[in-house]
Structures are given as C-alpha cells and as structure tokens.
Image: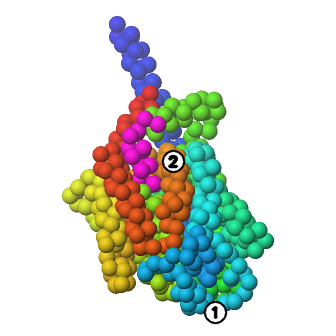
Amino acid sequence: MKVRLVVIFGRRVNRWSLKSTSMADHSSSIQVSVADESNAGSSIDFPAAKRKKSVVFLTTAFLAMAAMVHALLTRTLSIALICMTSGSSNSHDMHGNGSSDSHGMHGNGSSEYAHANSSCNTSAQSNFDWNYFVQGNVIAMHDWGELVFIPFTGFFISIGNPTLILLAASALSIMSAALFPVSVQSADYKGAMVSRFFLGISHAFTSPAVDAVANHWLPKVMRSTLYSFITSGSQVALLIGNPMVAAFCHACVMGGWPVAFYVPSIIAAVWLVAFSSLYFFKMRESDNHDLYSPDQNASAPLGMRHRVKHLSRSLVKEVGTNGAVWALLPCSMAGTWTTRFFIFYVPNFYRDVLQLPLLPNAVFASLPFLVQIVGKILFSSVSDCMLARRWLSRNVSSKLFNSISFLGSGFCLVLTAYVDKSSRHSVIAVLTTGLAVYSCSAPGYQLSIVSMNKRWTGLISSMCTCSAMVSAITLPYLVAAVVHVGTESEWRTMFFCVAAMDALAALVYLFFGRVDDDHAKALLNQSKSN
C-alpha cells in the first residue's frame, strides 16, 4: 500500500514538475519574444507611452493634411466656377429670359459685376457659357464617380491595408485635378466632367481609408476631439483655397482660374511624398511589414474559404441587421446637402441676391468654415469632457449634439430666408452661425462612423459616403430645377429644402443612432468564446 502511494505520489510530482518546467519554458519564451519584438519594433530610446503618443500625433497630423489636400482638390471648384463664368451666362438670365429682379444680378448690372470681379481678359477666362444646369453636371460628375465605386471600396479597405489604398488613391486625385484645366480647354464642359469623374473615383477610396486608419490609431478616450482635428482639414482648405483662387483669378495669375487646380495639385503632391516616405520607413522598421493591422496576420493561416464565410456572417450580423448603422445614412445625406450647399451655392446666393463682388464673396463664403473649425474642436472637447466626468454617456451625448447640429443649422437656413437682404451683414451672420451650429455633428453621427465597429469601419464609412453621394448628386439637379434666374424667392425655396432634410436626419438619429454599438460587441464576444 505504501509502495503504491509512493508511486502515485511520485508520478504526480513528476507530472507537476514537468508542467511547471514547461510553463516556465513557455513563459520565458514569451518574455524573450516580447523582448525581441520590443527591441526590433522600436529604435527610439524614449518610453513606449511617449512613443505611442508621438504615433497618435503624427497620424492625426497627416490625416488632417490628407483631408485638407483632398478638399483643396475637390472643393475650390465653387469659386473657380464663378471665376470661369463671370460675364457669361451666370451673369445673365439662365434661360434667356429678359426678366430682372430687384435682388438678382441681371441686365446692366451683370456687366458691372463681371468688370468688378476680374481684370483678366484672356480667352480662357471668358469663354465658358455654362448655366446652372451645366455647372450642376460638372459638380455632380465627381459624385457619380464616387458612387460607382464606393459600394466596393469599404469591403476592400476592411480586409486590406487602408494606408496603401489611401496613398494610391491620392496619386489618382492629384493627376485628375492637375489635368482639369487641360481637359476644359480642349473639350469644354465635357472635359471638366471626365476629370471630375476620375477625381470622384479616387475619393471613393480616400474617405473610407482615412476613417479606417483613424479608427485603428486614435485612442477611444480622445477620439472625438482628434477626429475633429482631422475633419477640420477640409475647412482649412476652404479658408485657404477660396481667397487664394479669387485673388489669383482677379489678378489673372497663370490665366486666373487654372490656379485653383495647379496649386492644390502641387500641395497634394508634397503631402503624398512626405506621407509615403514616413509610411515606408515605418514599414521597413517593422518586422511584419504591416503598419496598419497586426490582427490581420492572426487570421492569415485560415483558409480563404473559411475566412470569407466568417466575414460574410460577421457582415450580416454586425452591419446588415444593425439599425444604428442604417441610422447614419440619412445623417450623411443631410450633412452632405448642408455642406455642399455652403460650399457650392452660398457663393452663388451671395452673388445673385447680395450682389457681392468676387473677392468679398470668397472671403465671406469662407468665413463659416473658419467658425466651423472652432466649433468642431470646441464641441468635441466638451463631449469628451462630459464623458470623462461621466455626466452623460457617449450615446446620449452623441444624440444631444447631433440634434443641436441639424435642427440648429436648419433653423438658421429658414431664418435666412426671412432676413432683410438689404442688410448684407445680417444675412452673412445668420448663415455663418448656421454652419457653426452644424459643427456639433462632429461628436454626433460623425463620431459614430469611426467608433461603432472597429472591424467594419471602412465598410460603414463607405456606406455613409455612398448615401452622401446620392444626396450630393441630387442637389445640383434640385438647384437647377428650382433656381432659374437667381431671385430671392428661388433661393428661399432651396433654404427650406435643405432645412427639411436636416430635420429628418435629426429625428432618425435621435431614435436609432448609437456610438458604442453594444450589439456588435456582444456578437464579437460570442464569436471569441466559440
């Protein structure tokens, strides 16, 4: 009996010693591997926490510059169109009618307006007889190009490398914008439409890629504020681009309006070289050659068939049947209407109704975007502060700011319709306030896009971009159908249409919107447990 106990006890001791030895070896191997990874992954001597902060800072800065250069490439077209069509059809009755309006720029006032707008008399400056319908087609072709490819880009970005996709798409954007003047001078508005179409294709990849990179690198605690810095790059572009284009157009530098496309292309090319150099340097420094998502390497051994099946199930559960995702679509549509209306049509409203010359027009049309930058950072900081102090949850805060954003901006648009147009500064002040209030959407639905689901951020962003492009395409045709001559009553109708869209988006997000998607987290935890 004693011998048996000794044997059993001896076996247990041996098993325990073997297990402890294997565990020690395993832990030591883990420590060695971690040490090797840390030594191989960092060639900088300062602590890892400070290194992580520097990565977050550089990522935020370069993504903000990405938003700025892409906005320069796409959105300075508004002032460029006014410069290209000054003294032509835009300064006259759009449909050949001889009617005039006390608040419209028709008749003899058109020649005075054109003379005040530019001192450039080159043929490239004055040969474009484009009415609002033609201009709408030129503007909308960018959105058509984006709409054709956006249903596929989100999925590719979600399973691929968003940084490389962003770099490749940026190169296409630069080429498309740089060739715009050549295309216009050789094929008139048809060349402009082709150039804008390819620019839209590139933007179909850049916007979801920026959101996917932001979701991966930005810490959740400060994500609202940092993402506001990134999206503020678009407003910085308008602040710089609109006055710059107007000044060059007025002075007839490099032919006037072509500067709106050459200078942004040069700035974007410099950014592309700098960001590419940083990315490939970090990729060469990394052992796994994957700067974006190391988690993807874990799924590499899986068979392609099994992976596609798993991704399909995850896609249906986390995105397809998720009401919070679909609530983002009307917000994206309304936000696009509001932003595009201020970018492309408020300058026309200032010209038609307020009779502003080109240079003051560019300055006052850019003013709302300056206020929007301050509003984005301010409201996002307040939202993060409320979350840190636990005054409100992230979801409640998001719904609150989103409602203020759309309802407030819609109210300002309606109020503008009734303000006396003889008081120019009052009209400009109300419109500027409207876009400032709209900046509350940064901690609203915009934060939800980059925070709801880490795996499918690229796809969710592409869905929102797709819905935004649908609304962006309809807006120029709606303006062309409503605004024939440019009278005050026609623009009042447009203000009402945009305000109604804003109200609809506020209500939908109030009932169905979320930032922290509990449904997706539960499904993710369930898949891990299985």
Residue flagged by tag 1: what amino acid is it? Ser
At horizontal 33% and vertical 66% (from top left) the residue drawn is 414
Q: Residue 260 is drawn in which quadrant? A: bottom right
Counting from the top left corner in percent of width and height, residue 25 is at: 51, 39
Counting from the top left corner in percent of width and height, residue 492 is at: 39, 68
Neighbours of disc 1 within 10 Å: few (<14), some (14-19), many (20+): some
At horizontal 41% and vertical 53% (from top left) the residue drawn is 331
At horizontal 66% and vertical 74% (from top left) the residue drawn is 129
**Distance of mark 1 from mark 2, alpha carbons?**
45 Å
Does residue 142 appear to the left or right of 21 in the view shown? right
Residue flagged by tag 2: what amino acid is it? Met
Q: Residue furthest top?
A: 1
- The residue lying toward the viewer, choosing from 515 and 119, is 119
**Where does label 2 land, which residue?**
463
Q: Which secondary structure is most common in the magenta stretch?
A: helix
Counting from the top left corner in percent of width and height, residue 49 is at: 43, 63
**Where does label 1 land, which residue?**
119
Is residue 228 in view from this perspective? no
Is residue 95 in view from this perspective? yes
Residue 379, magenta (yes or no): no
Mark 1 vs mark 2: give the one in front: 1
Does residue 483 appear to the left or right of 267 in the view shown? left
Above or below, 328 against 253 in this view is above
Neighbours of disc 2 within 10 Å: few (<14), some (14-19), many (20+): many
- State which tag comes first along the sequence, 1 or 2: 1
Above or below, 275 against 529 in this view is below
